[in-house]
Amino acid sequence: MSSPTRYKHLFFDLDHTLWDFETNSKETLFDLYNQHNLSDRGIPDFETFFKSYTFHNKRLWERYTMGYIRQEELKWKRMWLTLLDFKIADEPLARKLSVEFLEHLPSKTNLFPYTFEILDYLKGKGYHLHLITNGFEKVQHAKLERSGLKPYFKHVITSEESNNTKPNKEIFDYAFSKVKAEANESIIIGDNLDADIQGGINAGMDTVFVNHIDADPYIKSTYIVKDLKSLEAIF
């Protein structure tokens, strides 16, 4: 069955678009908070710990996306800076938390509502589905495997594999070459305005902003949807 629009290749983002990163990371950090008895180290409660981690993680991811820091620095420094907020200057603990976080995170399988239904719908329409993500190679593939998403995607392009990050045009050029697609027959579907939407614009693609959290759309996308089911109106 052929697709009803000019698009042939749909490039999805994974985290915060299909895979509920916020919920999954919070569950993982809650496990680590308890396993390492962080309340005994001077962190009064989990919510305070999570709020601090979220602040540092967001800031470091922005720096990683812009190419200012490397992957390894992002991984452990978000833990290190979080611990420092509570006057815990324990680098071995920060590095241990970093390793364990990435080991356990893929075991969490919370997805946004209607994820499987929309992927089934799109595959039934004849679209070629791919993933393009700034996430880490091993971790992203583990998430796909354990959450049941892997069979839906023909290709998974990561920043680690392509040696580039969204929004750089180069990661999209790499993706087009790998899947044998053209920009004018492709569209990116993602939640991040700076990485996904600006990245798609940089690559000459149409874009869909998945605005789960009702954020200010300060970068203009081709389409905006509030939830995954609303993609049916586009495709």
Image (cartoon, rainbow, N blue to C red):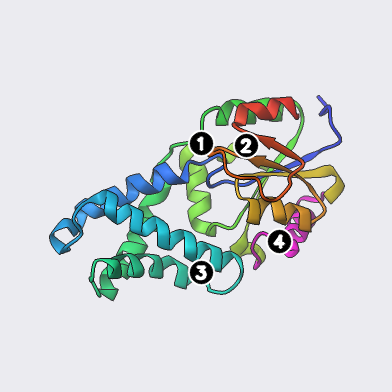
Position of 212 with respect to 93 (left or right) is right
Residues at marks 1 and 2, CA–CA distance in whole angstroms: 9 Å
Residue 178 in percent (x, y) is at 75, 55
Contact (CB < 8 A) between labels 1 and 2? Answer: no
Query: How far is mark 3 from mark 2, CA to CA?
Result: 27 Å
Left or right? Give the position of 199 relative to 66. Answer: right
Return the disc, 4 or 3, that comes first in the chain's sequence: 3
93 shown above or below 29: below
Please, what is the three-letter code of the amino acid marked with disc 1?
A: Gly
Viewer-side residue, 158 vs 200: 200
Label placed on residue 171: 4
Q: Is residue 211 above or below residue 158?
A: above
Please tell me whether mark 2 sits on a helix, a strand or a loop.
helix
Q: Which residue is mark 3?
A: 71
Q: Which residue in the structure is indicated by mark 2?
A: 152
Q: Earlier in the sequence, mark 4 or mark 1?
A: 1
Residue 76 pos. (x, y %)? 39, 69
Q: Earlier in the sequence, mark 3 or mark 2?
A: 3
Question: Mark 1 = which residue?
Answer: 148
The magenta region covers: 163-181
